[in-house]
Amino acid sequence: MKIRKKKNLPVEEVRRYLEPGPVVLVSSCWKERANVMTMGWHTVMEFSPSLIGCIIAEGSYSHTLIRNSGECVINIPTAEMLDLVVDIGNCSGAEVDKFEKFGLELAPAEKVGAPLLAQCYANLECRLFDKQLIGKYDFFIFEVVQAHVAARPKTPQTVHYTGDGVFMISGQTVSRRRRFRADML
Amino acid sequence: MKIRKKKNLPVEEVRRYLEPGPVVLVSSCWKERANVMTMGWHTVMEFSPSLIGCIIAEGSYSHTLIRNSGECVINIPTAEMLDLVVDIGNCSGAEVDKFEKFGLELAPAEKVGAPLLAQCYANLECRLFDKQLIGKYDFFIFEVVQAHVAARPKTPQTVHYTGDGVFMISGQTVSRRRRFRADML
């Protein structure tokens, strides 16, 4: 699988990548232990600081690594990675080294300890911003502190989970820019 | 625009409709004042109780109605409603009656005071479940207390916002059910 060449993206603009609702791969690292998980429950919360809220279930290996390190990387896969996305979500880092098992290409992050998944078309380095809802809802609020995105394709196909093993693949993009009030863009 | 015939859906199953990340229309009502807004920042948070978290900006007319009534309806539009979705998002209920302006067909909800938008293919009646993050992040946690969905089409096209006036339209669905561990479905 090819490695995508990346450029930096202003962190205020990550909504463009996350708001459509793709399944993401979350990589983490704490005390020499590292892992990657598949995640579908997330939302943009603010432009600046660039905040993302997401659910990471207690009891999962990633929950422990991310809660303790206070960091992760949100990697956005494309449709060609669908089988990998499913397989990563169907095993636990407590039992297997997923990076080795799936032969994942890694790249170092700039601001966090967790690795970037090089095959993904966007990598968002995150620091835990607010942990007050972790105990009650497993809800983590992260600040995106560095963002790397592939220059092309401009609008890759992403995968969106609907439950029951079924995914929606993103379709065409359409602009309605002319219908918007200038201050709403 | 046609009115869709609906059936009830167990509230634990609403992730199927929201997890892919569609833009939604949120209707609300408080003290004879009613409104509808376009919203894209939301996430599933739990199956049971069926919890949804979302951002509704302070200062918006809907924020006031929903915060005071503690209720809303999350309505999911299809791609044929895209221009309506844009137009609803580009005006304020403080200045115009959007239901009248856009000729929206309404239906009564069963458990909340806000109306259902009959043209949408899914209507999720919500009660405010946790308000502790409203003050800091405009983040509302709702419990879906009743769900109505159209029997068909089974997988309608939904719209997903990427910012800058550009939308992604949902594409094909693919099953990877056979790759899943039984307990992960």
Image (tube, coloured by chain):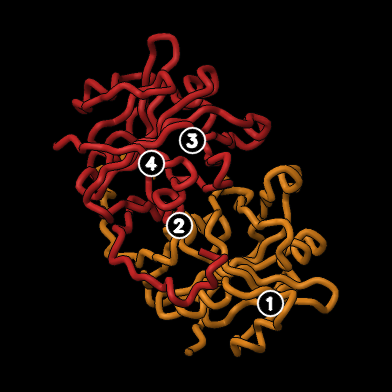
Chain colours: A orange, B red
Question: Which chain letter goes with mark 2?
Answer: A
Q: Which mark is residue A115?
A: 1
User: Tag 4: residue type?
Assistant: Leu
Callout 3: 10 Å neighbours few (<14), some, many (20+)?
Answer: many
Question: Which chain letter goes with mark 4?
Answer: B
Q: Secondary structure at mark 2?
A: loop
Percent coordinates x, y for residue B56 in the rendering: 50, 34
Disc 1 and disc 3: Cα gap in Å? 37 Å
Q: Nearer the viewer, mark 4 or mark 2?
A: 4
Foreground: A23 or A149?
A: A23
Callout 1: 10 Å neighbours few (<14), some, many (20+)?
Answer: many
Q: Earlier in the sequence, mark 4 or mark 3?
A: 4
Percent coordinates x, y for residue B146 in the rendering: 43, 32
Task: Name the residue that disc number 3 marks.
Answer: B144
Residue found 53% across the figure and 66% down from its top: A24
Disc 4 and disc 2: Cα gap in Å? 22 Å
- Relative placement, left or right, of A167 versus B150 is right
Task: Name the residue that disc number 2 marks.
Answer: A21
Question: Which chain letter goes with mark 1?
Answer: A
Q: Are marks 4 and 2 in contact (CB under 8 Å)?
A: no
Tell me if residue B63 comes above or below residue A24 in the rendering: above
Q: Which mark is residue A52?
A: none
Residue found 32% across the figure and 41% down from its top: B149
Marks 4/3 same chain: yes
Q: Are marks 3 and 2 in contact (CB under 8 Å)?
A: no
Residue at the extreme top of the image, as rendered: B31
Q: Secondary structure at mark 3?
A: strand
User: Tag 2: residue type?
Assistant: Gly
Marks 2/1 same chain: yes
Does residue B136 appear in the picture of this structure?
Answer: yes
Task: Name the residue that disc number 4 marks.
Answer: B9
Marks 4/2 same chain: no
